Amino acid sequence: MIGDALIAQILKQENVDWIGAYPYHSLIDEAAKINIKPIIPRQERAGVNMADGFSRINNGNKIGVFIMQRGPGAENAFGGVAQAFSDAVPILLLPGGHERTKTQRSPEFDSVEHFKGITKWSANINMVERIPELMGKAFSLLKNGRPGPVLLEIPQDVALQEFNGSTKYTPVSTHLSSADPDAIKDIIKALIKSKNPVINAGQGILYAEATKELIEFSELTNIPVMTTLAGKSAFPENHPLSLGTAARTGTKMCDDFLKNTDFILGLGTSFTQSNFQAPMPTNVPIAQSTNCTDDINKDYRIDFGAIGDSKLVIKQMIEEVKSQLGPEGRKDNNHVIDKIRKLKDEFIAEWLPHFTSNELPMSPYRVFHELAKTLGSSNVIITHDSGYPRDQLSPFWQATNPRGYIGWGKSTQLGYGLGLAIGAKMAAPEKHVVNVMGDASFGMAGMDIETATRSKVGTLTVILNNGVMTHYSDHMPVATEKWESNRFSGNYSKVAEGLGAFAKRIETPDKISEAINLAVKANDQGQPAVLEMITKEENNVPNYWF
């Protein structure tokens, strides 16, 4: 068989049943021959985003794959890969490459070199005989350690060359490790001495599928849990010990407990400092559990560290708490649950007028309220685009199940959420998958509604159309104010209808719920839906720390 056929066979053995792809790439046909479904997006970045969303919902157990043409195709995919790298998402990238006799010629785009800074590993299949070895290494890196994209370029002559060796391939296994027992003892000892500890849970909890263990540990120790934006949904936000999410915006509960804590325990988080994560207090001890040594002392000086898989580490911590305190654990002597309930009631009361507002143009918060009321959260996967859709949604959407919310933000490319939603729906077709985006985001990525139509992927896209780039318009030169050049216009529901989606334009709050129900019926038939909500420019967000 030729090289491409062997690569396709290995993908099949690694449980890959679809690939995002944008021609030309000779591997596409070979994959299709063995029932690996190719899905062709309208642009490469969207295809990468789809693979990203698919990997996230599968917790990396099934890997999203994107295949792109050499040169321009790889160039167009770059932004999506950068986003996946910043958010630690495992995706496999298989760009085409020039024949080996034509490499290293300026000005050709060299995928291997250019992608090194945004991948865990970027390499070239230099010999057809090495395909099993190099594909095995790629999947090993995808399945082990800190997640991230991996790129393996396929030179055209290698793709078409006959492979005469053994085609036997064994799928790669995942290998997990626990932490140093002495490190666990030290963390728990310090934790028990503290009066107001807080757990900061990150995306590592989701990848390790450690929500159950985190709940047990939190209840055993009566320690409240906040999550990072990427970790949102790792801990159920209807739990009495949940503080919610602390990102660029966040909850009053997170704000209060961060101001008064005397010990931070980070679980499955890199503690990355950014504009999209609440800063940690630097005058209190910080403990951190991560599966990546590069995270330790990266942005914060860590007092206690434990390297290992989050599920295994939390199990160790549970046993250590029982060893030091007994099976009943740490009592709620500080009445933490009552305090959280009081703060949450105050927070909801403060913001309730926004969620029940009848004003016109509509408040985006009223749109979120109707979404939650109509769809619930138990069978929903929701994500957002960058800017105010993220900042307004993340503090208030109550995520109750792991991966019920796809939070992201370290790179924040406009238009990212639509591809994520399509990939997520392919990973979990039984779920209602919702993407909330602004009109600027739709301008960046909206054509891939047609990709969902053609592929029969029933996602729900909610466009918050306020005609501006919200706070970004503040950065426009003053001289532009005498023109309307910074105000967008368009009827996006008509565009979406032309792309094959069920589409409605909603201008009054009383019509929102009815439109959502109609959209869900369309989704159930495999038709994507787009609801264009005519909303006000809403600058009011719960921002406590920036």
Image (spheres, rainbow, N blue to C red):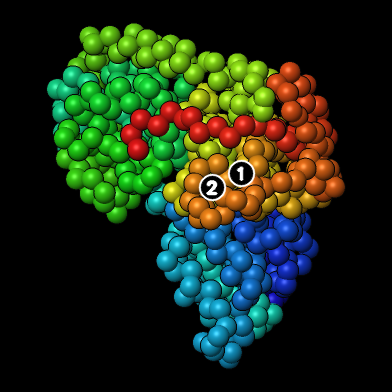
Q: Name the residue at 36% across, 21% down.
A: 253
Give 359 or 376, whichever is nearer the viewer. 359
Q: Where is 121 relative to 80, above or below? A: below
**Residue 285 as seen in the image, left or right of residue 347:** left
Q: Could you tell me which quadrant the N terminus lies in?
A: bottom right
Q: Residue at x 39, y 52 (%)?
A: 145
Where residue 340 sits, quadrant-wise, is top left
What is the three-letter code of the residue carrying label 1?
Val
Q: Tell me if I can see residue 33 in this picture.
A: yes
- Identify the element where label 2 is drawn: helix
> Which residue is the site of mark 2?
473
- Above or below: residue 516 compared with residue 58: above
Give the image location of residue 336, x and y in percent: 30, 13
Residue 94 lies, with reference to residue 71, above or below; the image says above
Residue at the spot of label 1: 468
The residue lying toward the viewer, choosing from 103 and 419, is 419
Name the residue nearer the viewer: 217 or 386: 386
Residue 422, x across and y down, in percent:
68, 45
- Location of the C terminus by quadrant is top left
Residue 492 appears left or right of 472: right
Tell me the distance, in whole angstroms, between the alpha carbons under discs 2 and 1. Answer: 7 Å
Secondary structure at badge 1 equals loop
User: CB of mark 2 within 8 Å of CB of mark 1?
Assistant: yes
Amino acid type, mark 2: Ser
Q: Horizontal placement of 430 versus 174: left or right?
A: right
User: Alpha-carbon neighbours of circle 2 within 10 Å: few (<14), some, or many (≥20)?
Assistant: few
